[in-house]
Image: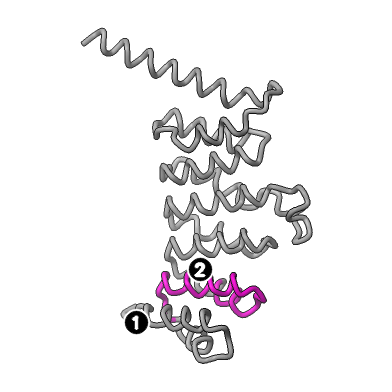
């Protein structure tokens, strides 16, 4: 029994040392982004690994690594990472414009990854943070991930912002995601708008989605 305990301790310490080295190697000038990204895809859920992933999200200079850390926290459904994930929902968004996408700015990948992670953690306290970030977001792909996250964390607070975005957006992709998320949330306040879209002059896929979402609303509330 004592030998087994020593072996477990040794493996854990060795694993932590390896993880520490990987997380800090970039700062010493080695390009190990791809190694870290692959490592994070399979890293097991432990208190130490969660702590390390939060550290990578907070401190690693690479947006690719930050996004991979956020994705890993989401895969683990690590509630401990909630605050860091919420913080990075607006990472780089002040300087982010529609023209910046594709121009070398990769911060949007981090924001999207954080939204996807929060959608998996499913803490309703994150809804207000996602809504605030959505209100200032300019990147269409990130907006879709934010809207999708709101649909994955059903809460009445999301309904009005989604209805407003549905009214204002010119993007059919964003519109479709809003319709889908409103159906998942199921709040009856969305009925009139969904009905209008289902019977309106919109592409068939938009009208069909609105019909499906309208039929899925919860009228018992």
Residue 88 badge: none
Residue located beneath label 1 in the image:
219
In the image shown, does 117 or 32 lie closer to the viewer? 32
Instruction: State the residue lying farthest toward the top.
Output: 3
Q: Where is residue 171 in the image (x, y as percent from the top left)?
A: 64, 73
The residue drawn where x is 55% and y is 72% is: 162
- Magenta span of residues: 162-188
Reply above or below: 70 against 16: below
Q: Position of residue 150 (x, y in %)?
A: 49, 63
Image-based side of 90 in relation to 43, left or right = right
Q: Looking at the image, which residue is at 44% across and 28% down?
A: 48
Q: Could you tell me which secondary element the residue under label 1 belongs to?
A: loop
Q: Height in image: 157 above or below 4?
A: below
Q: Which sits in the foreground, 103 or 216?
A: 103
Answer whether residue 204 is magenta in the image.
no
Q: Is mark 2 on a helix, strand or loop?
A: helix
The relative height of residue 63 versus residue 195 in the rendered view (above or below) is above
Q: Which mark is residue 158?
A: 2
């Amino acid at each position: 029994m004592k030998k087994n305990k020593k072996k477990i301790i040794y493996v854990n310490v060795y694993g932590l040392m390896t993880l520490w080295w990987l997380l800090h190697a970039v700062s010493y000038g080695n390009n190990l982004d791809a190694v870290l990204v692959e490592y994070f895809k399979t890293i097991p859920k432990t208190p130490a690994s969660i702590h390390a992933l939060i550290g990578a999200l907070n401190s690693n200079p690479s947006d690719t690594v930050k996004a991979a850390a956020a994705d890993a926290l989401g895969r683990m459904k690590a509630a401990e990472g909630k605050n860091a994930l919420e913080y990075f929902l607006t990472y780089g968004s002040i300087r982010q414009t529609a023209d910046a996408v594709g121009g070398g700015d990769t911060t949007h990948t981090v924001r999207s990854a954080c939204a996807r992670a929060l959608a998996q953690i499913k803490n309703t306290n994150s809804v207000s943070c996602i809504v605030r970030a959505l209100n200032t977001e300019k990147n269409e792909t990130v907006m879709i991930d934010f809207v999708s996250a709101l649909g994955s964390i059903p809460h009445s607070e999301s309904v009005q912002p989604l209805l407003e975005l549905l009214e204002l957006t010119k993007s059919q992709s964003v519109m479709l995601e809003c319709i889908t998320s409103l159906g998942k949330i199921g709040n009856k306040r969305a009925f009139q708008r969904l009905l209008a879209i289902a019977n309106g002059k919109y592409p068939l896929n938009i009208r069909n989605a609105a019909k499906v979402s309208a039929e899925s609303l919860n009228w018992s509330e």
